[in-house]
Image (spheres, rainbow, N blue to C red):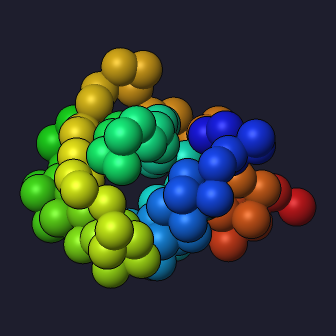
Amino acid sequence: MNQESNTPQQSAIWAALKTVMDPEVWIDIVEMGMVYTVAVTDNRAKIEITMTSPSCPLHVSITNEARQAVERALPSLIEVDVQVVWDPPWAPERMSDVAKKMLGSVG
């Protein structure tokens, strides 16, 4: 999750995605390391996210929630495309230190 050197639109998208929670652990998808790509070209956003497990039954609702959060934050965007990708697979190492601490993984 590379949030450095973002445009103002990309920064606003990252902030919007921090409002989307993984409903199993109630930590946002950014801190969980589930957001892979945030790109904006010609006022169109393309966001790639993953789930913590390929068998996650909530991938549709999380994807929809992410799209809606970005659309609310940036109504000027022409399109918000949120795609679920599986490569690379999610791993606990992708979590931020904040998420790890919340889950008891960091002392």
Whole-percent x, y for residue 68 in the image: 24, 72
Who is closer to the viewer here, 38 or 21? Answer: 38
The answer to whether residue 80 is above or below residue 19 is above
Q: Is residue 66 visible?
A: no
Q: Quadrant of the C terminus?
A: bottom right
The answer to whether residue 20 is above or below residue 97 is below
Q: Is residue 94 left or right of residue 29?
A: right
Who is closer to the viewer here, 38 or 99? Answer: 38
Identified at 23% across, 40% down, the residue is 83
Whole-percent x, y for residue 62 in the image: 24, 63
Count of all numbered marks drawn on residues in the image: 0
The image quadrant that residue 98 belongs to is bottom right
Who is closer to the viewer here, 29 or 70? Answer: 70
Who is closer to the viewer here, 77 or 85? Answer: 77
> Quick one: which residue is furthest to the right in this view?
107
Q: Is residue 19 visible?
A: yes
Q: Is residue 7 left or right of residue 84?
A: right
Whole-percent x, y for residue 19 in the image: 46, 77
Whole-percent x, y for residue 23 in the image: 32, 74
> Quick one: which residue is furthest to the top in this view?
87
The image quadrant that residue 46 belongs to is top left
Identified at 25% across, 63% down, the residue is 67
Q: Quadrant of the N terminus?
A: top right
Identified at 34% across, 68% down, the residue is 76
Q: Is residue 107 left or right of residue 68?
A: right
